[in-house]
Image (cartoon, rainbow, N blue to C red):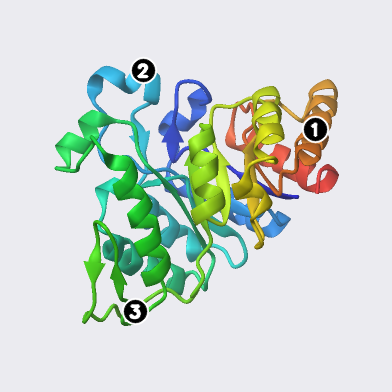
Amino acid sequence: MRLGLVTPIVTRHPDNDASWTEDAGPAEIAEIARAADRLGFHHLTCSEHVAIPAGVTRVRGARYYDPLATFGFLAAQTSRIKFVTHVLVLGYHHPLAIAKRYGTLDRIAGGRLVLGVGVGTLEEEFRLLGARFAGRGPVYEDAVRALRESFGQREPRYEGAYFRFEGFVVDPCGVQARIPIWLGGRSPRSLRRALVQGDGWDPFGLDVERLGALLGRARDWPEWRQRRTPFDLVLPLDRQLDVTRADERRTFLDLVARYRALGATVLNLRFRHTSLAHYLEQLEIVAREAT
């Protein structure tokens, strides 16, 4: 099981943020990235929102670094760690725009990109960007198919229900002809979509008990039984712990074992931290004791 990091600072969410990150920025993000790269963590994340309605920032948070710019900066600071968009809202983009922009990033990073994608839930942001909110599910599914066919292709071709293109050149394109695509969400439907269309499922907001119940049912689904290629279960640790404390470190290691028993292939980690030094100390402990 690989361990990835839900990167602090780049997103400040009321449920899981630390006060010191308010004034932190690129220098601290780069230090975290270099440490995670050196210690062998699997990935860093960055989420996407263009603009959050002021009235919902208390629920969703207000800070969201742009993943394309952030990962381009961090690619120059690291050599091994992967970069996961956690997640791109496909309804905000044409698939070829993602194939070009993130294909360029994949080339700059030497093939270290994982595309996490989602259907999106913030209707006000869809309206702001002139994107279609109602009926977005079928458009999203077609966009995933179009992205699969076009990423890493210099002359992509696709014909689907909502997207059609041929006769165009995308240069540069990604270096991964089979870019890993993880589908986000928290519903049974999102897991079914991931099993059919993706390389992994990257859920949010589900604790270990609910994940266990859902995955137990899902293993009887035809989509699961008919799957013949590798599939990542990218599960989020359902609580924040301070692993510098011996009691919480034991709880953390017990939780890691529970997620491994559920079939997790990747674990997304957050910690409870009070400073950059405190966060980096926890990375050292986890790398030493949980990998």
Residue 215 location in percent, x, y? 67, 35
Per the model, the C-alpha gap separating discs 3 and 1 is 42 Å
Q: What crowding class fits label 2: few (fewer than 14 Cα within 10 Å), some (14-19), or many (20 or more)?
A: few
Per the model, the C-alpha gap separating discs 3 and 2 is 40 Å
Q: Which residue is mark 3?
A: 172
| Mark toward the start of the polypeptide (3 vs 2) | 2
Per the model, the C-alpha gap separating discs 1 and 2 is 32 Å
Circle 1: residue type? Arg
**Observer-nearest of 5 and 176:** 176
Identify which residue is drawn at 49% across, 69% down: 109
Q: Which residue is mark 2?
A: 58
Query: Is there CB contact under 8 Å for labels 1 and 2?
Result: no
Q: What crowding class fits label 1: few (fewer than 14 Cα within 10 Å), some (14-19), or many (20 or more)?
A: some
| Mark toward the start of the polypeptide (3 vs 1) | 3
Identify which residue is drawn at 75% across, 50% down: 1
Circle 3: residue type? Pro
